[in-house]
Amino acid sequence: MKLRDAIQVIDVSKRYADVLALDHINLNISEGEFFGLLGPNGAGKTTLIRILTGLTTPTSGRASVLGYDILREPTMAKKQFGLVPETSNIYSELTAWENLMFISKLYGVPKREREERALKLLEAFGLKERINDPVRQFSKGMKRRLTIAAALIHEPRVLFLDEPTSGLDVQSSRLIREALRRLNKEGLTIFLTTHFIDEADQLCNRLAILNKGKICVVDTSENLKKSIQENEVIEVEFGLPPSNSEELKEHCSKIIKLNDRKFRLYSSDSSSILPFVIDFANNKGLKIISISTLRPTLEEVFIKHTGIDPLMAERMEQLRYEKH
């Protein structure tokens, strides 16, 4: 049975003066999906989330959440989702408990239900022991966790997260990812923007890469990796340097010498090259220390479509947060 679309984006563009931030975006995200939007800083990720959540009006095109047009039916659309912006938007002078009570009242959640939900959420995000502490005493990671809890207090069916783990400590990032996995397994549709390649690879069912306002590609992580695989790659390390490594080229389209004993071999068929490497080692009296087949990574897919090294992008993002 085909699931209906939880999020639909039809030909959405957004222009700021002379800058085209989004250029005719089309996306369909099914109910229950964990969908990731990857892209470097300035690609248009935040602009798209702001349009999907009614914070920004598109220049053209339309978007809907669970069938409700975000422009024509904003009240009904906003009841369906929770939003976690890039910067935590909770009240520092209030306690964790007071923040959740205040936000749940805005959504009209009955008293008993909001108290039960708040306790579960604070426990799920590791904040129960700080329930009565003012948020101004919280670390950045704790504030982000509380922001996610607040976005879930009215039990939305869709959750939008804009760079939820940027600038956070390892413990908070891990806790957030584990909670998101659990929520998605329980049926929550999640739309995540991130520039962290590993995060998207670990969490998302499908991914889109956005660059300079355009969607470059949309597919599962595995399919995206396969799409750039021109050759299979074998990496082999011998116990001693081979006397004539040139012989390895006989069955390879390309060979890279990593050091005197370690080589990366490229071939259109790894099934034929593996026996050749083993025979080569036996004939040369060499011991094979390690041998493995390498697959393309999502990082390589990202570089192909954006021309940007994601590790450098992550470092630039970290520096941006350190300045704040």
Image (cartoon, helix red, strand yellow):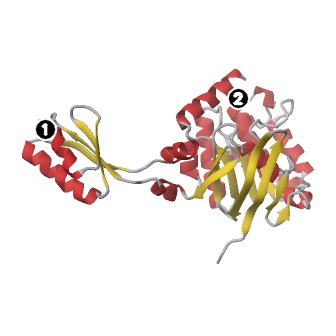
Q: Which circle's residue, 2 or 1, is located before the other in the chain? A: 2
Q: Residue furthest top?
A: 323
Q: In this view, does 93 lie above or below 115?
A: above
Decide: is 152 above or below 94. below
Residue drawn where x is 13% and y is 38% of the image = 244
Residue at the spot 74% in from the left edge and 38% down from the top edge: 86
In depth, the one of 275 and 16 nearer the eye is 16
Left or right of 176 on screen, residue 68: right
Q: Residue 318, how many percent across, how many down?
A: 62, 28
Q: Which residue corresponds to the image point at 83% horizontal and 34% vertical from the top-left? A: 95
Expressed as whole percent of the image width and height from the top left, the position of residue 251 reads 22, 52
SS of the residue under disc 1: loop
Work out which quarter of the rendered image holds the N terminus and state it. Answer: bottom right
Q: Residue 244 carries which label?
A: 1
- Callout 2: SS: loop
Q: In this view, does 273 lie above or below 3?
A: above
Residue 119 can be seen in this image: no
Badge 2 is on which residue?
139
Residue situated in front as seen by the camera: 90 or 43: 43
Kind of residue at badge 2:
Ser
Relative vertical location of residue 295 with respect to residue 90 in this rendering, above or below:
below
What x and y, as percent, mark residue 84?
Answer: 76, 44
Residue reaching furthest front? 18
Q: Where is residue 12 in the image (x, y as percent from the top left)?
A: 78, 55
